[in-house]
Image (cartoon, coloured by chain):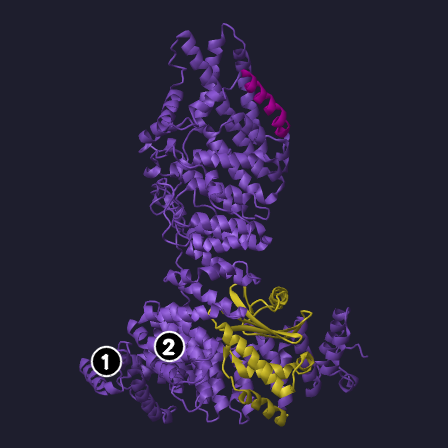
Chain colours: A yellow, B purple
Amino acid sequence: MGIRFILMVNKQGQTRLAQYYEWLTLEERRALEGEIVRKCLARNEQQCSFVEHRNYKIVYRRYASLFFLVGVDNDENELAILEFIHLLVETMDRHFGNVCELDIMFHLEKAHFMLEEMVMNGCIVETSKSNILSPIQLMEKTS
Amino acid sequence: MASSSSPSLMDSLFQRSLDDIIKGLRHQQAGESAFVSKVLEEVRREIKSTDSHTKSTALQKLTYLHSICFVDMSWAAFHAIECISYPNFTHKKVGYLAISQSFQESTPVILLISNQLRKDLKSNVEVEVSLALECLSRIGNLDLCRDLTPEVFTLMASSRIPVRKKAIGVVLRLFGKYPDAVRVCFKRLVESLESSDSPPIVSAVIGVFCELASKDPKAYLPLAPEFYKILVDSRNNWVLIKVLKIFTKLAPLEPRLAKKIVEPICELMSKTGAKSLMFECIRTILTSLAEHESAVKLAAGRINELLIDEDPNLRYLGLHALAIVAPKHIWAVLENKEFVIKSLSDPDPNIKLESLRLVMAMVSESNVVEICRVLVNYATKSEPEFCNVILGSILSTCSNNVYEIIVDFDWYVSLLGEMSRIQHCQKGDEIENQLIDIGLRVQDVRPELVRVGRDLLMDPALLGNPFLHRILSAAAWLCGEYVEFIRNPVELMESLLQPRTSLLPPSVRAVYLESAFKALVFCLHSYLQSATSSDHSALGLSDPGVSSQSYDEYSGAHGENGEESGTTLIQENHITPDSVLRLLNLIDMAVGPLSGSYDVEIQERTRNILGFTELIKPVLSDSLHPQDERHKQQAEASKMVRLLHDTFSDELGPVSMSAQGRVPVPDGLVLYENLADLEAVCGSSLPASSATISFEGSHNVEGATSIFISDQKEESEPSSESTSLLAEHRKRHGLYYLPSEKNTEHHEANNDYPPANELKSGVTVSNDAQDLAKLAEQSFLPKRKSKQVKARPVVVKLDEGDVLPISSKIPQAKDDSLSEAVRDVLLGNEADADTLTQKAAADSVSRKKGKEKLNAKEQEDDLDHMDSQSGTVQNPVKERSKRSSRKQNADEGDHGGDKGKQKRRHRHGKHRTREGVQNPPANVISQTPVPDLLL
């Protein structure tokens, strides 16, 4: 499966985007997000970005007021996932111009489409920023 | 606002947009849920609108609330399907997003989207195709995947790269849900591996293979040459990481492959600037190429670099890598021992945890004492959570494989006692298990166990800590069971019956009472014994009927041992008539009130004790006064006490967990089949419990009894009984316990056995991290010579009983069929594959039209194929010629690719006639999946 879920959470612990690659019920999601957010937000800058949780790992990174949390299988490459998060942020930056929490809130759909371009079935399929963004630009033209 | 259920024109005109909702949500600080439910009410009304814009906006809002506020949207499934059928792309994409966020395989209306998906998959608009593919990859179930396999297959050859890429991504879902799709799509997937001209395709396809190979690597071994090519040629780090992951799985299966890839991987590792790729190389080498010493050395070098890095992420990963290498190359860990020890006090709990694992990996017989000493000391200063993690890992490491690494059990037992007293200790259950387990297995350590147990029982402060109750229960049981080693049984009685025991839960209190009973019997017994023997010596009487035969042997046995515990002790503590009276009074006072307890266990045991004291009291009190009848009375008392004493004196030993299995099923006993169904349930739950040990009563055993009983008499006259539960259990189920011949242990105890306390002072326990650093120098070095020449005591092990029964897992049928299909395709049964392309197409057609005729025809086709195929396999001439042709191609040396090309040629030929008449299948012979490249 590789990537199991991707969360974007603000400093207050509110979920701003949640994408799951395996089916969870709403209750399970709520519980999971609660646990993870509690675990990760309590950590400081001097601590590493990897947290073991249940039977998988969470790789997270903080950008300004937003936390990007990715749940991955245990044999997934942590550093690659960190790079993936960075790539995601750079891509959003390119599209929104210095992306912030509000951009994601108001353009949740777009953020989802970017993720869909990058990840399929929990596998990273696209890592070129222009390739990721071109369908979105196409969509904007189409609609 | 209209309150009717159908939306009015007003609703449409003044519908709030998603942006309005988001703004509204942002301004709600406290009353968010009220706001959400209001919006939800609007949405429910608006979504019923026939206007596509109103409906899709409502759905959009709902989807937003669903993903941010956990609002249920399963009720809107049908509306989402309506939305994807709108021609307007904006509405369509809202519908698709809603579906991929909220549908699951079992959503009832899911099959309704099959036609719409097919339509969109065939669309000329690229983004529509993308949406449909994306959706299928998220929610595809068996039916959808089966129905849409032909469309996806077509798209895999699309000239539009983004579409092709996504089609490849979807294949993973198709294979997972509908394994027969492999026969259709696999070849195109393999072909895509070679499309080095378009990196996105390779990137996508390698991701798919990485996932597939992680489930069943063996099936993909024939593709090793293709993967190897990518490993050598690719410059994309993402792709390289995936390829390395694939090789991690493949290399252990084929040594020649491992040899082949070592060099390029090492090169990659030293050349790359990307830490992620470098780490993946390290991990691949450590997990799958650990036999290649030089590669491991190189990797260890890179690990050292990670460890000294500023970045905590790299330090963590460095430790993680060491943990991977530890089982096979402990030297790599030892090289970095200073760092590992230092990391125990890292500010990051994750790093601490990782280094703790490594420290435990370094533990050996020679350094276990020092490491545990330091760790326990460290645990006392840690925060509760980490403290318990440390304690837990000490407990599990030391008890591993029946206390394999423990030589000095006295030390270990006192360590257990010490751990119990650590403020944050919450490992009561585990410590309880180990205390009892050791008591049963290691005879020589019982005096020390009893000492530790007594110390715990004596301390009234411990009773207030609920985490310790399980440990206290174990301590009470041990002191009762092995009461003969107690220096002062009266004192033990007092601590077992102290007022604060009311703080204990009933189950533990019951154990306390039972132990008190055993101790009482033991006291009376030794009192009477000493009284009789002194009388005998005084009066010169010989009264073999009553006399203390067992007592003599007991003292004899202990005389041999030269141990201080036995005879001498009793003489020292000579139990006086006064102390017996005091004991009886104590019982009246402390136990008496419990006879009305609501807890059955407590009540029952209380009654037992009180009944016994009532019986014994008149006899004893008479005997306390010197009368004429004295001897007779005393004899009677002796008899009674001895009776009970003997009841308690059976030795308990570990029983093999599989003992039950060795009991032959008696004739006439029918084991009903439906009980076998329970095995799946019980199989997993049983071994998890503390059931490694059950108890054995030797009196039920006929075979080995003679040795056994005499052994017991020699060793002591143990007044032992476990809890009454146990006794009852033993009586009732005694038949099912089998003898363990190994129970006869040797008395190797030496006098020069160093007491545990001295060891304690032997190691410096200063309170600092320096201590940790010192440890690095002190221990982990093989040079250390053991201080004591003491042999390891016998630890009773049961032949196979200590190994938990491994419940064989039922392999997943789906994976099986998947890998079977892959194997079929790779081994060249491609004719079959073509049939299946048709079959899948025909399948969906027939499903649409509902005609069964087609199905029947297909089956005939299938049968034809099976015939012709079996024909080809039986043709050895063909096989040979094929092999020789392969040899000629040795310079290319790539039979997978070779075959792929053949397949492709074949495929092109066939593709045109796909819907046409069935061609006779090509003669393809199954070959062993070992690529020539590796030779």
Q: Amino acid at mark 1?
A: Gly
Residue B713 pos. (x, y %): 37, 26
Quarter the C terminus of chain B occupies: bottom left
What element does badge 2 sit on? helix
**Residue B587's quadrant in the figure?**
top right
Q: Position of residue B456 (x, y in %)?
A: 55, 37
Q: Are marks 2 and 1 on the same chain?
A: yes
The answer to which of B276 and B522 lies nearer the viewer is B276
Left or right of residue B465, residue B36 in this image: right
How far apart are labels 2 and 1 at the CA level? 44 Å
Residue that appears at 31% across and 29% down: B706
Q: Would residue B285 be seen by someone viewing this image from the given angle?
A: yes
Residue B383 falls left or right of residue B23: left
Q: Which residue is mark 1?
A: B871
Q: Position of residue B499 (x, y in %)?
A: 64, 31
Identity of the residue drawn at 50% across and 45% down: B431
Mark 2 belongs to which amino acid?
Ile
Quarter of the view holding residue B262: bottom left
Query: Which residues make up the magenta segment?
Result: B577-595
What residue is rendered at 36% in x and 76% in y?
B220
From the viewer's perspective, tell me whether residue B404 is left or right of residue B14. Answer: left
**Is residue B614 placed above or below A70 in the rendered structure?**
above
On residue A54, the disc is none
Dot 1: what SS?
Answer: helix
Q: Residue furthest top?
A: B628
Disc 2 is attached to a residue of which chain? B
- Magenta stretch: residue B578 in it? yes
The vertical placement of B504 against B218, above or below, is above
